[in-house]
Image (cartoon, grey):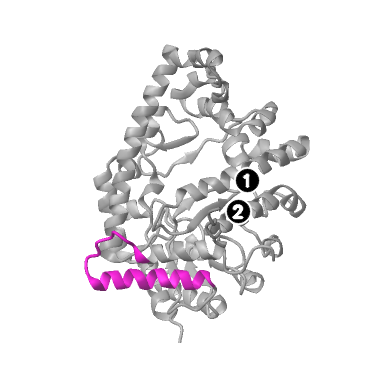
């Protein structure tokens, strides 16, 4: 009997992911010095995740639309004109030189949304001005009586119920049966009949057209970010994306109002649904990270903030499945990077869960008291954030220097800390952003 291959431990899988991330195989760096700068930056991030002291505190800029506006490019142009997107990202990174790339795909492919008649968001030229960021249009895209359908078969529910509601081009998909109807010869013909309907055929042609446009977009974005890495030695901070199961239910399907009411009106269904979504959230993260990519998975946390639900509800509805998702990602050698939007001042003792291994997560905090974060999470998880957007926009550069130094002195001297802004930056005083980045590079050196 052939001996089975050794099952790798999560730490071993992560170590290999980290090695590939640092190696950047296939990248043609502009010079040996640029390669060395890239490797040093990745090593700083690896060290800080592991709660060690890197050579200095890394600085991460959590960007919204500012790289575009800084370069004089409208958000609409960034979503439709990829050469202009590339020019903007090149200028931003070369001028500010943070320790990682602000990824170009975050702005999205406008043509894809046009083709599919996207309804979940308004984007520049489609409901908001050309210079504005996109906006979510919350609605009840999953009805209250559809929990069982979601729980029974999430993929079928998305294809036949959810997607026809958020993409006008997919409205005919509501006529499709589940693919599991295609079993044996006597049933196959009947199961395929809906795919011959003219409206369904047109919907699939739209899907193919959107797929071609999406391929054009991602190839352009990969070239933009690849050039930034090769010419400036900047690594990607984030390698993939996923969400907390409760946020999938609340952001994507039910909407804030309805998911909060569901906690009282149908709590058992909410719990069944979020548990059903755990493996899907894990799988989304695992599939996102290719060879050589950053092992960090961005997870923006929305509905669990202090202002959205009580501590009791957080412990019941939000944290158990988020924790399961975190642990599932760690098992695959990934580093969940949890972006705590709003405040988690009442959650710190809960999230510092001893079941989650130390040095296996990164937490970006927006409005949470970072000094309390240091007390509760220090020595357990890498943390960052808490530089307010107001500091980047409204005060003087010298005040930014003072603020940054005080933050480093208060929470950054023991390792495990990344200097970062709290909320994503859509507008800034460039001198202030320079002051934050440059002060961290000079003052954040470990001696």
With respect to residue 261, does 72 lie above or below? below
- Could you tell me if residue 187 is visible in this image? yes
Q: Is 59 situated above or below 312? A: below
Tag 1's secondary structure? helix
Q: Secondary structure at mark 2?
A: helix
Q: Earlier in the sequence, mark 2 or mark 1?
A: 1
- The residue closer to the viewer here, 46 or 422, is 46
Q: Is residue 435 above or below residue 216?
A: below
Q: Residue at x 55, y 65 (%)?
A: 11
Magenta residues, dominant SS class: helix
The stretch drawn in magenta includes residue 127: no
Q: Which of the labelled discs sits on residue 278, or is there none?
A: 1
* Residue numbers of the magenta segment: 23-50
Badge 2, how many Cα within 10 Å: few under 14, some, many 20+? many
Residue at the limit of the structure toward the front, as seen here: 1
Tell me residue 234's x, y (percent): 34, 64
Q: Are marks 2 and 1 in contact (CB under 8 Å)?
A: yes
Picture quadrant of residue 211:
top left
Circle number at residue 423: none
Q: Is residue 399 left or right of residue 216?
A: right
Residue 241: where, in percent of width, then height?
Answer: 49, 50
Residue 255: percent from the left, percent from the top?
Answer: 61, 37
């Amino acid at each position: 009997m052939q001996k089975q291959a050794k099952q790798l431990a999560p730490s071993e899988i992560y170590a290999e992911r980290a090695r590939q991330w640092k190696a950047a195989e296939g990248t043609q760096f502009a010079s040996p010095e640029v390669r060395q700068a890239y490797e040093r930056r990745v090593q700083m991030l690896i060290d800080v995740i592991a709660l060690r002291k890197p050579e200095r505190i890394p600085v991460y800029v959590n960007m919204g639309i500012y790289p575009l506006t800084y370069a004089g490019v409208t958000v609409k142009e960034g979503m439709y004109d990829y050469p202009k997107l590339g020019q903007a990202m090149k200028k931003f990174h070369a001028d500010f030189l943070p320790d990682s790339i602000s990824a170009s795909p975050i702005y999205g492919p406008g043509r894809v949304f046009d083709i599919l008649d996207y309804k979940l968001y308004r984007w520049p030229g489609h409901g908001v001005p050309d210079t504005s960021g996109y906006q979510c249009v919350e609605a009840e895209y999953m009805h209250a009586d559809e929990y069982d359908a979601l729980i029974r078969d999430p993929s079928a529910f998305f294809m036949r119920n959810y997607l026809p509601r958020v993409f006008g081009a997919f409205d005919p998909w509501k006529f499709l049966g589940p693919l599991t109807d295609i079993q044996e010869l006597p049933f196959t013909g009947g199961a395929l009949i809906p795919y011959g309907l003219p409206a369904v055929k047109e919907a699939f042609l739209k899907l193919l057209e959107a797929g071609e446009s999406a391929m054009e977009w991602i190839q352009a974005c990969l070239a933009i970010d690849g050039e930034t890495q090769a010419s400036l030695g900047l690594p990607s901070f984030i390698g993939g994306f996923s969400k907390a199961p409760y946020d999938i239910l609340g952001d994507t399907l039910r909407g804030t109002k309805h998911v909060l009411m569901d906690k009282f009106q149908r709590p058992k269904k909410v719990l069944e649904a979020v548990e059903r979504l755990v493996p899907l959230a894990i799988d989304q993260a695992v599939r996102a990270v290719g060879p050589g990519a950053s092992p960090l998975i961005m997870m923006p946390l929305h509905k669990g903030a202090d202002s959205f639900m009580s501590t009791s509800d957080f412990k019941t509805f939000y944290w158990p499945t988020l924790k399961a998702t975190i642990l599932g990602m760690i098992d695959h050698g990934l580093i969940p990077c949890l972006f705590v939007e709003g405040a988690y001042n009442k959650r710190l003792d809960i999230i510092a869960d001893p079941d989650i291994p130390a040095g296996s997560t990164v937490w970006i905090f927006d409005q949470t008291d970072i000094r309390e974060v240091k007390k509760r999470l220090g020595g357990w998880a890498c943390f960052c954030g808490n530089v307010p957007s107001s500091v980047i926009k409204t005060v003087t550069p010298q005040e930014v220097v003072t603020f940054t130094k005080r933050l480093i002195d208060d929470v950054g001297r023991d390792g495990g800390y990344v200097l970062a802004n709290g909320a994503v930056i859509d507008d800034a005083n460039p001198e202030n952003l320079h002051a934050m980045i440059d002060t961290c590079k000079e003052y954040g050196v470990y001696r």
